[in-house]
Amino acid sequence: MISIPYLVCSILSFIPAIVCHEACHGFAAYKLGDPTAKRAGRLSFNPLKHIDPFGTVIMPLLLMAMNMPVFGYAKPVPYNPAYFKDPRKGDLIVGLAGPAANLVLAIVGAVVFTAVSLVLPVNVLAQNDFFYYFYAMFLPMFSLINLYLMFFNLLPIPPLDGSSIFAFFLPKKYLPTYYKVQRYAFPIFMIAVILVPYVLHFNPIGIYLDVTAGNVFDLLFSFGG
């Protein structure tokens, strides 16, 4: 059964992670000369501007209930590469902006965790429930969820950010075929994410996130505690 502190910390970690992720996509595109995201009201840190009913609410809750890594996605920020001086390079920069934001947030969480551990011993933190949960549960979860979101979005599957990165290195002659495949790839991928672990008792996404996000998390939090 999911505890209330765990649920609260998960929500307070996940919402800022996806909001900053999407807003940074928009800001990157805007700085490259594309006003599309600004016109759509997506250069905002208001969660309501970015929430996707399935990706932001239903899927994370399902994964949480199944004891799987909590990750998800928000509504993709609209942008038009035609505004960029170099569309392929601009697409790459915009694609990397979201994961980069999550990496920065994960590092911030680890730095705060380490600073607190150096200033206050655990036995002092344990005397106050709020500060204990903030230190022992929220900060590690905040960093880990940001790392999950970062590495999940780096998968080269549309509309995840990794597809923009993958397209940058793909020869131009293959791009039309790749863009045609995009419209079908993500629904199939999401079905696989939910069904494969239960049908085959094998969770490739969980393994991938453990190897990537898990190891980076261990490195970031090796200086505190």
Image (tube, helix red, strand yellow):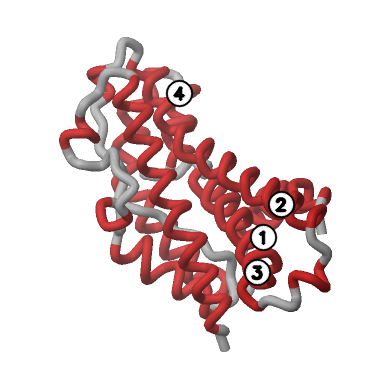
Mark number, residue 168 = 4
Q: Position of residue 185 (x, y in %)?
A: 38, 49
- Label 4 crowding class (10 Å Cα cut-off): few <14, some 14-19, many 20+? some
Of circles 4 and 3, which is in front?
Answer: 3
Q: Which residue is mark 1?
A: 140
Mark 4 and mark 3 lie on one chain; the one further toward the N terminus is 3
Is residue 156 placed above or below 223 in the rendered structure?
above
Q: CA distance from mark 1 to mark 3?
A: 13 Å
Q: Which residue is mark 2?
A: 217
Q: Are marks 1 and 3 in contact (CB under 8 Å)?
A: no
Residue 95 vs residue 181, the one in the foreground:
95
Residue 68 coordinates in the image, percent (x, y): 58, 70
Q: Secondary structure at mark 3?
A: helix
Please tell me how crowded label 3 is: few (under 14), some (14-19), or many (20+) other residues with Cα within 10 Å. Answer: some
Mark 1 or 3, nearer chain start: 3
Residue behind mark 3: 131
Q: Residue at x 64, y 59 (%)?
A: 139
Viewer-proximal residue among 118 and 56: 118
Please state which amino acid type lies under the numbered disc 2: Phe
